[in-house]
Image (cartoon, rainbow, N blue to C red):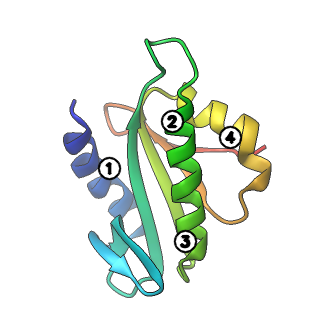
Amino acid sequence: MTPREFETQAREIMSAHFGSKLSESLVDGVPKRFDYVSQDGSIVGDAKYYTMVGGERLPPAKFATIAEHVWLLEKSRADQKFLVFGNDRRVPKLWLDRYGHLVTDVDFYFLEEGDSLEQLKRT
């Protein structure tokens, strides 16, 4: 699966999960086009399709990007804010192990190939 294919699949799954059609859009007050925004702006999210560096090492640049997206999501006025990950579960799990205690209101999900959605816990 490519990152673009993942984004499309995740849009369908997250739309069903929240019971609202999610489309790519800007939100008021945040200069970023998010992958998933409900028509009323109450739900905002983004997709990440990451893997470990060389299949085994921590991805510091990807960790920085996750932090950036968490910060941008927290600046939105949405009621529901989320990141949905695919490919390698270790990336969001390791990020949450290190930085999850700093996240206030962004939910993390992992989408397995085959449409199984899991909400990941912040530490």
Dot 3: what SS?
A: strand
Dot 2: what SS?
A: helix
Mark-to-mark CA distance, 3 and 2: 26 Å
Q: Earlier in the sequence, mark 1 or mark 4?
A: 1
The residue type indicated by label 4 comes to: Leu
Q: Earlier in the sequence, mark 2 or mark 1?
A: 1
Mark 4 surroundings: few (<14), some (14-19) or many (≥20) residues within 10 A? some
Q: Earlier in the sequence, mark 3 or mark 2?
A: 2
Q: Earlier in the sequence, mark 4 or mark 3?
A: 3
Q: Which mark is residue 107?
A: none
Residue labelled with disc 2: 61
Q: Earlier in the sequence, mark 4 or mark 2?
A: 2
- Which quadrant is home to the C terminus? top right
Is residue 69 depicted above or below 90 in this figure?
A: below
Q: Quadrant of residue 49?
A: top left
Mark-to-mark CA distance, 4 and 3: 18 Å
Q: Earlier in the sequence, mark 3 or mark 1?
A: 1
Mark-to-mark CA distance, 1 and 4: 20 Å
